[in-house]
Structure formats: C-alpha cells, structure tokens
Image (spheres, rainbow, N blue to C red):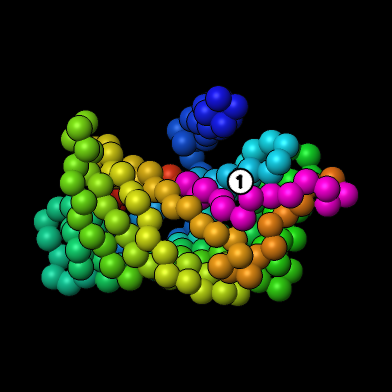
Amino acid sequence: MRKHTAALITTCILAPIIVASGTARQPAAAHAPLAVSSATVTIQGTSRKDPFLASTRTVRVNRLQLAEPRSNDLLQQALRPGGLEAFDLAIPVATLTSPDHGVDAHIQDSLKAETHPEIRFQLRSVQIRPDDAMGFAHRSAVGMLTVAGVEREVTLDIKVVPAGTSLMLEGRTDLLMTDFGVVPPRGLLGLLKTDPVIHVRFYLVVTAAEE
C-alpha cells in the first residue's frame, strides 16, 4: 500500500511539471523540420526508508534529423521505423535536483558528475507497438544510453499523444544502476541502503516547424 501511495504522490508532483515548459536547447539549423520545445526527465528510486525523486527540465538536443525522403506529415514520419535519421540528446547531471534535502547531491555524486557531466541517449531504431484502448500510439525506441561513462543499449517504452502541430511523448524505462558501474546512493551517514533499480520517466514535446 505504501508503495502505491508513493507512486500516486509522485504522479501528483509530476503533473504540473509536464504542463510547464522545460528547457530543451537545440543547435540552430536552417529550416530544421522538427524541434523539442519542452522536456522533463525524472529519476525515481527506493531506499529502505522512503522513495526518492530527482528531475530536470534541461535537455540539450545534439541532433534531431528526419530521414530522406521526407513525407508531407513530418510528425508521423518521426514515429515510423526508419523515419528518423538521428535523435541524439544529452542531460547535464548537475541539473538533476530533488525536493528532498541532500538527495540531488547524492545522485550527482553517484553518477560521477565531475568526470562524466552528461547522460546521453542516441536513438538506433523505432519499433511500432499496438495502440492502447484509448487509441494512443505506442512505440519502442532502442538506443545507446551513456551514464557515468558507461554505454549500454536500452529500450524505451513510449506513448504518443498528438496535440495540434506537436507530439507529446511520455516515455519510461527501468535501469539497474550497477549495469553502468554506478554505486546506489546512500542516505544519512550511509545507513540507508538504496535499491539498485531506478525508474526513468521523460516527457517531450516535439513540434513541427512552420513553413
């Protein structure tokens, strides 16, 4: 029951964040067809005492490129297998903050922020999954995730919600911190052990450029 209550509290915390505009920095490019206009990334884990949460709305888009030839519906092309030539983004570890005192410092230390200041994801492929009962499109995005200098292939489960000339993407994956050589953060005086599994959630708004 406590676990379900914590999840509900976390959802309530994230709801206003999803609506708010995040910071998605993207290199300027002439006639760029797509752009990430808003972004939120959250990391949630569990210690013996309480769940912990850290989030950021600072995401740097290194490259977002559609494959050629381009279709008339750029947003739908981005969702098709092979529709994207490249999707490469980075998250500054130092921007991860937590509402719980001291948690962000523990997370940044565990992620080796001083020597590996960014978390990076590079898309490799997109696979179509069945739509859900509400009619929302679902995709699996396979790519290379680099955390604390260690690169691993991961699969992201993504739900897509159309919104006019934009797409709202809600994605998730669960990671084992030890797979990336990351020592799970400990609480006060190192007495509180942390589960090595963390739950990563992200929310992106991808917008088609006006002609």
Instruction: Note whether residue 130 is visible.
Output: yes
* Magenta range: 189-201
Picture residue at 74% right of the left edge, 69% below the top: 114
Picture residue at 83% right of the left edge, 48% below the top: 191
Residue 171: percent from left, percent from top: 39, 48
Q: How many marks?
A: 1
Identity of the amino acid at label 1?
Gly
Residue 3: percent from left, percent from top: 57, 31
Residue 10, compared with residue 91, is above or below; it is: above
Residue 12 placement, left or right of 123: right
Q: Could you say which is closer to the camera, residue 104 or residue 25?
A: 104
Picture residue at 21% right of the left edge, 51% below the top: 129
Residue 167: percent from left, percent from top: 29, 44
Residue 157 placement, left or right of 196: left
The quadrant of the image that shows the N terminus is top right
Residue 72: percent from left, percent from top: 11, 56
The outermost residue toward the right is 189
Read off the residue under disc 1.
Answer: 45
Q: Is residue 80 magenta?
A: no
Instruction: Note whether residue 23 is visible.
Output: no
